[in-house]
Amino acid sequence: MLVSTFGRWGSRTRWSIVGLGVLVYGVVAVTVALVTAAGIRSHFSGPSVAAEAVASTTRKAGSPHDPPPVARVPRSASSPATPSPSPPAPTAGSSPPAGDPGAVGAAPSSAGARSAPPRPAATRPTRAAARPTAAPAPAPAPAPAPVATSAPSGEVWVDVATGLCLDGNDNGDMYTLGCNNGDYQRWVVSASGDGVRVRSVLTGRCIGSHANGSSPTGARYRGTVYAAACDGGAAQVWKRTSESQGYVFRNAATGECLDSDASGGLYTQDYNSGNFQHWVRR
């Protein structure tokens, strides 16, 4: 009987120990679960899944006018902060918008937001004043038309032997002289009858001649040459012929030729084909 009593007591004790162990295990499991849940909430700084589910259930059952839930994004130390967009550059004459970091005296919109460096105000380029237009220069006065100067009239005749020019004066004297382009040395030769007439440009007189006869020995004297008013007589008519040395002037009245010497004397003499009786135009 005693053995039976000890057997029943041992069986009860064994079951008591097993139940106590189960109870201790349950307490430990609950404690670990609570600690783990508290650590997860502390790490994510947000409500637990169960609390979120309860809140979601409450929102579904709540008023339809309640605002929609805002999804919370867990913060991560490794994700870079998104920079805020730069404000538009202010234009000249306009006031900067509220909250613009570049505005003078404007407070930042958030204590944690990074303030952008102030931008210099844009300045419009000033347009340079137009230069005054210079008055157009007056047109230059037309140059005066050149005065037409007539070429010197008349011809200059030079003795081939002496190089002196046929010359005369107001008294009607005739001679040869060094060429000087003077009007006393210019002559107009024009046709007259069977020959030509030689007239002074300056005095208007014509050259004439007359014979002086001959010496007792038969030698002819030099004929006289003069200048007189033009009368159209044979004494003022000369037959001009061209030869290799120059021109020969033969008087129509006397038949003698216009001749000269180195001293400037002028006269008429019978034709001898010498250079003293030949004349060229200059």
Image: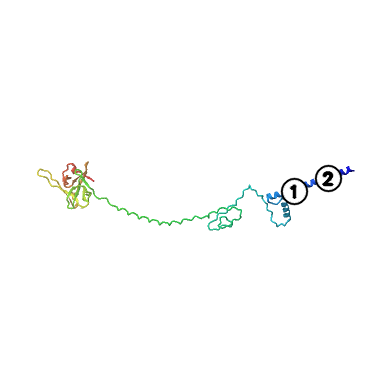
Could you say which is closer to the camera, residue 249 or residue 141? 141
Q: Residue furthest front?
A: 2
Instruction: Give the residue at mark 2.
Output: 13
The amino acid pointed to by label 1 is: Thr
Q: Residue 161 vs residue 22: left or right?
A: left
Residue 31 seen anywhere in this rendered image of the structure: yes
The amino acid pointed to by label 2 is: Thr
Tag of residue 173: none
Between marks 1 and 2 in the image, the one whose residue lies nearer the viewer? 2
Secondary element under disc 1, as helix, strand or loop, is helix
Picture mark count:
2
Tag of residue 31: 1
Q: Residue at x 69, y 50 (%)?
A: 42
Q: Residue 16 vs residue 225: left or right?
A: right
Could you say which is closer to the camera, residue 67 or residue 115? 115
Q: Residue 31 vs residue 193: left or right?
A: right
Give the colour scheme shown.
rainbow
Secondary element under disc 2, as helix, strand or loop, is helix
Q: Residues within 10 Å of mark 1 (few under 14, many from 20)?
A: few
Where residue 74 appears, as percent x and y from the top left, is 67, 49
Q: Quadrant of the N terminus?
A: top right
Q: Residue furthest right?
A: 1
Q: Residue at x 74, y 48 (%)?
A: 31
Q: Residue 161 vs residue 141: left or right?
A: left
Residue 257 seen anywhere in this rendered image of the structure: no
Q: Residue at x 78, y 47 (%)?
A: 24
Q: Residue at x 83, y 45 (%)?
A: 13
